Amino acid sequence: MIQAVLLGNAQDAGVPQAGCRCANCQAAWHAAAQRKKVCALGLLDADAGAWFLVDATHGNCNSFSIFDFTFDL
């Protein structure tokens, strides 16, 4: 069975964006709870012991922890 996991919920570079002075980005600079990760799709195939990232960027590195699993490969 393949499971799809949405990683993040922000476009482009996430929130906050470098150089942006909007209220959302300013709040995110000061409060980690306001930060948003870049969106990508994670596919987990537990039967095959594999996982794949679709449309991943360097901003998704912190999202890998959402895959709470271990494989004996």
Image (spheres, rainbow, N blue to C red):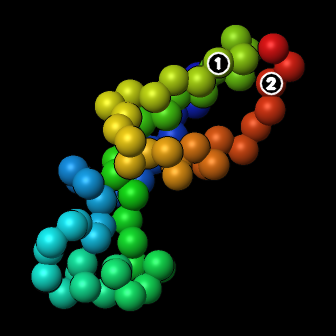
- The image quadrant that residue 55 belongs to is top left
> Contact, CB < 8 Å: mark 1 with mark 2?
yes
Q: Quadrant of the C terminus?
A: top right
Q: With 52 as the anchor, is 66 left or right in this view?
A: right
Q: Residue at x 34, y 80 (%)?
A: 28
Tag 1, which secondary structure? strand
Tag 2, which secondary structure? loop
- The image quadrant that residue 40 belongs to is top left
In the rendered image, the vertical position of residue 60 relative to residue 51, given as above or below: below
Q: Position of residue 35 (x, y in %)?
A: 39, 72
The residue sitting at the right extreme is 72
Q: Amino acid at mark 1?
A: Ala
Q: Position of residue 30 (x, y in %)?
A: 38, 88
Q: Which labelled disc corresponds to residue 39?
A: none
> Which residue corresponds to mark 1?
50
Q: Residue at x 57, y 43 (%)?
A: 64
Q: With 73 as the anchor, is 2 left or right in this view?
A: left
Q: Residue at x 72, y 44 (%)?
A: 68
Q: With 3 as the anchor, is 71 left or right in this view?
A: right
Q: Position of residue 1 (x, y in %)?
A: 64, 20
- 60 or 49: nearer the eye? 60
| Label 1 packing within 10 angstroms: few (<14), some (14-19), many (20+) | few
Q: Amino acid at mark 2?
A: Phe
Q: Position of residue 14 (x, y in %)?
A: 30, 59
> Which residue corresponds to mark 2?
71
- 26 or 3: nearer the eye? 26
- Going from the N terminus, do you reach mark 1 or mark 2 first? 1
In the rendered image, the vertical position of residue 57 relative to residue 54, given as above or below: below
Q: Residue at x 52, y 52 (%)?
A: 62
- 47 or 59: nearer the eye? 59
Q: Tell me how far mark 1 sits from mark 2, CA to CA.
A: 8 Å
The residue sitting at the front extreme is 19
